[in-house]
């Protein structure tokens, strides 16, 4: 379970981390201008053969454009910061950069430049590269010195991370390059993406050059790629939520199905055994057949039906060992999948099948497990005939209001931490089981003496509830004829004061009132004081249960 959870977390972290890098491309600008946008421009040259082999250039630019409309004229200003670096086989050859500003105007009728200069030279008369006035309406359109075919709706991955919907304008062809790089036959492809209203979303350009180097005349080849991405804008760039979901989240759904449904089915596939000499078929599975009767030989036989109802409400996995007629063994696996409790025959096989790390079982030897702690199982009979009177001023039933204090007390007892997350089971217990509290007033003389010792020696302090001190608690599960006592806690400073005795009798009294004829409990084999309490109630030793584990636990292992 933990491995699958970690794997799912990893699959979650990867797309989330990728998306964090994509967030800068989702910006929306609020401005007083008619148009305002920020962009990034990345240009890369990679030598692929001949004299250019191992040579590379990188050009990085980012800028901001603001445009104001005045009749049929758009007045624009731009700030651009750029950086250039060249390398040969990874070693830096040249590096420089600059910051520049541009002021120009263009027509809102056809997009042609009117005055001033943009980033390209000799631009007068060419159409502006970032705006198609009136929107994309025809089958072709000119930008700068090229004419593009209008392909139609398409998706561009801005920053290669975030999908946006746009109208795609495409151009490709071959031209003769004759410049500082040399004389080449250049084959290019360029795709521009605009909103329907004619505002730029991004541009993707690639070019392959094959020819002669300018300095040496040697045959050479290199490849150019460039990307222009709008990172934030005052206009709406349509985000493609469908593609975004498919790219980043559908795989999580797929792996969830794979790990938590398909794997779950394979993980809990029933196993079939044939036992000699009877040669009867025994099936162990994560299921409890409804048409079979219980035939479980266990000290817990009477209370198992109650455990079954309780286990389902607590979200435990139920596994069983049965033949064609009877259920011979049963196991309850805690929601975390680490701890299980097993009764009846075939417990060893059920432990192996469930793959738990810790098991409470009536057998003490299981291959691969070591004994951690042993418990004696006691049964208290004839509750009706027992004197179960207790100090009612000391004991009271717990309510939901008491939950935080009870949880902190138990969490500290088991884990040394008072956070309620370490004892979440208490919430269910208070809701569904019998829960009693041992309380005392801080004004009682015996209480004051104990509290003085606690403060003087800096011992762990008990929980306070209004004007009362919680000094102990205990739980009980009622069944049809039998009940189960569990989870007895007494604050260490208040032990040997009769608190445990009162908590035991209060719970037995509650079971008696609910019609239970007997009760069962477990006591660690070393816990003599607890055994003496039950000996006064004529409790009979009816069996034992052992906690076994793959390794020694760091904290106390409990099942509820």
Image (tube, grey):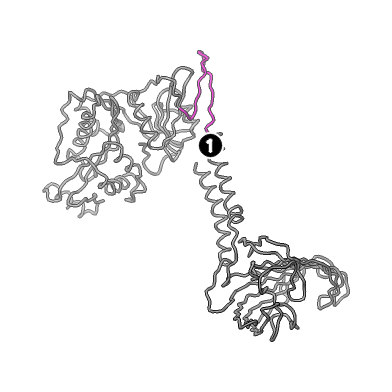
Residue 216 screen position, x and y as percent: 87, 75
Q: Secondary structure at mark 1?
A: helix
Residue furthest left in the image: 445
Q: Is residue 496 left or right of residue 105?
A: left
Is residue 10 located in the magenta-colored stretch of the structure?
no
Q: Quadrant of the C terminus?
A: top left
Q: Which residue is mark 1?
A: 264
How crowded is the residue under tag 1: few (<14 C-alpha within 10 Å), some, or many (20+)? few
Q: In terms of depth relative to the viewer, which is nearer, 130 or 419?
A: 130
Q: Does residue 440 lie above or below 26 as drawn?
A: above
Q: Is residue 207 above or below residue 17?
A: below
Q: What is the magenta range?
A: 267-287
Across and down, in percent, residue 338 comes to 44, 38
| Point 65% across, 64% down: residue | 166
Q: Nearer the viewer, residue 4 or 414?
A: 4
Relative placement, left or right, of 229 versus 520 is right
Q: Name the residue nearer the viewer: 454 or 187.
A: 187
Quarter of the rendering containing residue 230? bottom right
Q: Residue at x 25, y 47 (%)?
A: 401
Indicate the position of residue 126 as horizontal and vertical percent values: 74, 79
């Amino acid at each position: 379970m933990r491995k699958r959870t970690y794997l799912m977390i990893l699959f979650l972290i990867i797309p989330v981390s990728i998306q964090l890098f994509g967030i800068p491309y989702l910006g929306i600008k609020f401005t007083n201008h008619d148009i305002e946008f920020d962009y990034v421009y990345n240009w890369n040259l990679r030598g692929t053969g001949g004299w250019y082999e191992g040579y590379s250039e990188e050009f990085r630019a980012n800028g901001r454009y603001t445009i104001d409309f005045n009749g049929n004229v758009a007045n624009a200003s731009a700030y651009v910061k750029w950086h250039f670096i060249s390398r040969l086989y990874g070693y830096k050859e040249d590096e420089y950069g600059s910051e520049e500003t541009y002021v120009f105007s263009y027509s809102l009728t056809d997009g042609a430049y009117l005055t001033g200069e943009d980033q390209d030279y000799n631009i007068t008369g060419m159409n502006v590269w970032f705006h198609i006035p009136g929107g994309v309406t025809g089958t072709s359109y000119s930008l700068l010195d090229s004419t593009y075919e209008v392909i139609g709706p398409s998706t561009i991955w801005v920053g290669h991370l975030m999908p946006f919907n746009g109208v795609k304008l495409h151009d490709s062809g071959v031209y003769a390059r004759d410049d500082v790089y040399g004389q080449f036959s250049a084959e290019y492809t360029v795709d521009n993406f605009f909103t329907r209203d004619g505002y730029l979303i991004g541009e993707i350009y690639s070019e392959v050059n094959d020819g002669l180097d300018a300095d040496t005349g040697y045959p050479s080849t290199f490849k150019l790629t460039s990307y222009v991405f709008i990172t934030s804008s005052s206009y709406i760039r349509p985000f493609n939520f469908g593609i975004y979901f498919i790219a980043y989240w559908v795989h999580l759904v797929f792996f969830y199905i794979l790990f938590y449904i398909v794997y779950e089915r394979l993980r809990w596939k029933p196993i079939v055994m044939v036992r000699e000499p009877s040669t009867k078929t025994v099936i162990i599975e994560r299921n409890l057949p409804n048409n079979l009767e219980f035939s479980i030989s266990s000290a817990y036989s009477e209370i198992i039906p109650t455990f079954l109802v309780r286990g389902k409400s607590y979200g435990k996995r139920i596994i069983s060992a049965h033949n064609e007629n009877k259920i011979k063994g049963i196991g309850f696996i805690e929601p975390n999948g680490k701890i299980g409790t097993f009764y009846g025959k075939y417990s060893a096989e059920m432990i192996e099948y469930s793959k738990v790390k810790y098991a409470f079982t009536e057998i003490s030897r299981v291959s691969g497990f070591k004994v951690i702690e042993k418990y004696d199982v006691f049964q208290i009979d004839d509750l009706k005939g027992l004197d179960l009177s207790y100090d009612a001023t000391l004991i009271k039933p717990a309510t939901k209001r008491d939950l935080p204090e009870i949880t902190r007390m138990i969490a500290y007892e088991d884990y040394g931490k008072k956070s309620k997350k370490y004892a979440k089971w208490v919430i269910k217990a208070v809701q569904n089981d019998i829960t009693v509290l041992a309380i005392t007033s801080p004004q009682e003389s015996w209480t004051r003496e104990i509290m003085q010792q606690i403060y003087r020696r800096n011992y762990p302090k008990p929980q306070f509830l209004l004007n009362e001190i919680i000094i102990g608690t205990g739980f009980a599960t009622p069944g049809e004829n039998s009940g189960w006592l569990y989870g007895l806690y007494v604050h260490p400073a208040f032990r040997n004061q009769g608190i445990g005795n009162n908590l035991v009798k209060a719970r037995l009294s509650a079971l008696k009132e609910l019609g239970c004829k007997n009760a069962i409990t477990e006591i660690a084999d070393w816990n003599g004081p607890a055994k003496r309490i039950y000996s006064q109630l004529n409790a009979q030793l009816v069996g034992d249960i052992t906690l076994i584990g793959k390794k020694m636990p760091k904290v106390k292992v409990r099942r509820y």
